Amino acid sequence: KQEVTQIPAALSVPEGENLVLNCSFTDSAIYNLQWFRQDPGKGLTSLLLIQSSQREQTSGRLNASLDKSSGRSTLYIAASQPGDSATYLCAGGTSYGKLTFGQGTILTVHP
Amino acid sequence: NAGVTQTPKFRILKIGQSMTLQCAQDMNHNYMYWYRQDPGMGLKLIYYSVGAGITDKGEVPNGYNVSRSTTEDFPLRLELAAPSQTSVYFCASSYGQGHTEAFFGQGTRLTVV
């Protein structure tokens, strides 16, 4: 059974810092790895999708990497801003598009 | 372009009552999913469907039922609501087999009292 773990559970940083969120998974037979953002009381917004054959994906200030052999993915956020404050969830995708989620990292960026 | 639409947004149920959570998508996606999210936790898969007329259980299906009569709609039925079903429910859809991005609705916050 796939298990996904995210570290740290919460992170508070000053504006402008570069930061890394970690995600680990137990079953390397994933089809893809997705990172999502969730604002309080809202749904999930997809940030980055890395296919199993890829090593990384980039979108603006966000960069996500995937290492299937070690069962790890990282989300790098450059030059953090208060608007980046949210919960970040990673999820491993398996057959039929089913997703196994981590518990999330609550990020607070203070001015 | 509405994406994935869930109704209602909020609902309070009494123990033993039943209700249906509605989900509709307008992206012509084949695959649809229902997840629940408990406080401080990640999402867990309840049921999923790979096309009209085809549904299957996820990780936490007990107490729920689904149907998929059209590509667009994927309602989730709660029978005999219990306090353990208090949660936020998310519907999602994706285009195909395992390699494509999932799109989520805004969620239904359900409280069973």
Image (cartoon, coloured by chain):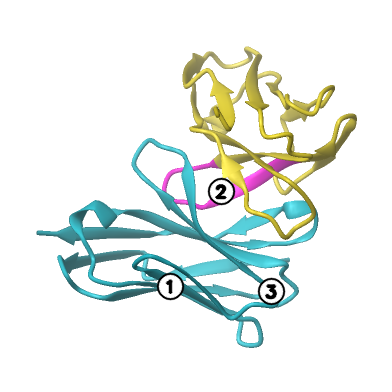
Chain colours: A cyan, B yellow
Q: Which mark is residue B43?
A: 2
Mark 2 is surrounded, within 10 Å at the Cα level, by few (under 14), some (14 to 19) or many (20 or more) other residues, namely many
The reply to whether the C-beta atoms of the residues labelled 3 and 2 are less than 8 Å apart is no
Question: Nearer the observer, disc 1 or disc 2?
Answer: 1
Residue type, mark 1 in image: Asn
Residue A2 visible to the viewer: no
Per the image, label 2 sits on a secondary structure element best described as: strand
The quarter of the picture where the N terminus of chain A appears is bottom right
The quarter of the picture where the C terminus of chain A appears is bottom left
Residue reaching furthest to the bottom: A69
Subunit bearing disc 2 = B
Whole-percent x, y for residue A104 in the image:
44, 59
Task: Name the residue carrying label 1.
Answer: A63
Q: Which residue is located at x 73 percent, y 46 percent?
A: B95
Q: Which residue is located at x 37 percent, y 65 percent?
A: A60
Whole-percent x, y for residue B71 in the image:
79, 29
Same chain for mark 3 and mark 1? The answer is: yes
Tally of numbered discs: 3
